[in-house]
Amino acid sequence: MDGLIFGLKDVYFSYLGKFPALCGIDIKISKGQKVSVIGANGSGKSTLLQMLDGLIFADKGEVSFRGVEIDEKIFYDPEFSRDFRRRVGFVFQNPDTQLFCPTVKEDIIFGPLQLGLEKSEIVKRLEMLVESLGIQGLLERPPHQLSVGEKRKVAIASTLIINPDVLILDEPTAGLDPLTTRHIIDLLIDENTAGKTIITSTHDLHIVREMSDVVYVFGMDKRIVKFGRAEDILNDTALLAANNLVHIHSHRHKDKMHAHPHLHIEHHNDSV
């Protein structure tokens, strides 16, 4: 996993110049890594991913992509912008943000058409993804008529068809049933095995162990409070509880109330 893909050094960002979202962030992401960013809602996870995708830019600090510092000005260079968009794919937390064409098929092929891929190559990739994701029956349907799980599959397909080197996914399993979650996680692991760098934001601890070589924990102060191996992070229940990543359950025992963290790491799926 040699080769630095993203490097962030002392990065700050605030909305409207007065609402802090990232404070002093240092992150290094190497080629072929699986990286997860976990934290409660509002801790800065989505802001970080948007910055990695070149949708917003640091107020202070340095963000680099493959050794090149990225800011708003560099995307004015059409050659750099096109190369970046070919190499980096982003799946939004809300699929409706990503799906806007009259049909699913048009949504999936929109990206590669804009990037100038050959139509024969687009057809080949489309056929492969349709089979892999099991969405053949959805191609002529309007995206707004799909279920949440179907929309998420289509959003992922519209990103994978570009065949990016880096996949950035914001809460890819939010609101999904266990079987659909399993299907998507298996697909992403296969993409990583094929060499892609996978960056996932989530507060779903069920998927962290499989989806992470490195885990970054964000606190509500918009800073990284800890990073390390998935096993070490998931076993630190005090850290998880302090950052609102586990439920605190209370119960009565001998007329006294007791509180303890409740952590589910593994999925239980009776339908599989």
Image: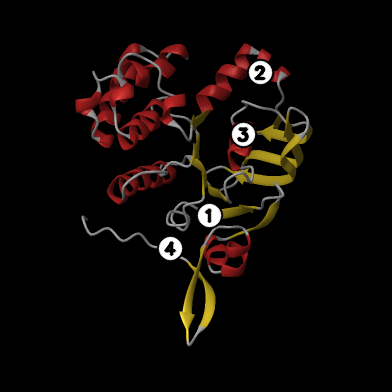
Residue located beneath label 1 in the image: 213
Query: From this viewpoint, which residue is outermost toward the front?
Result: 255
| Distance Cα–Cα, label 3 vs label 2 | 13 Å
Q: Judge by depth and name the residue closer to the eye, 238 or 115.
A: 238
Residue located beneath label 3 in the image: 52
Which mark sits nearer the N-terminus, 4 or 3?
A: 3
Pinpoint residue 229: horizontal percent, then vertical percent: 57, 61
Pinpoint residue 186: horizontal percent, then vertical percent: 34, 47
Position of residue 88 in the picture relative to residue 216 (left or right): left
Position of residue 19 in the picture relative to residue 6 (left or right): right
Which mark sits nearer the N-terminus, 2 or 4?
A: 2
Q: Which mark is residue 265?
A: 4
- Examine the rendering and report whether any part of residue 11 can be seen: yes
Which mark sits nearer the N-terminus, 4 or 1?
A: 1
Which mark sits nearer the N-terminus, 2 or 1?
A: 2
- Mark 3 and mark 2 residues within 8 Å of each other at the beta carbon: no
Number of residues whose C-alpha sits closer than 10 Å to that of mark 3, classed few (under 14), some (14–19) or many (20 or more): many
| Distance Cα–Cα, label 2 vs label 4 | 40 Å
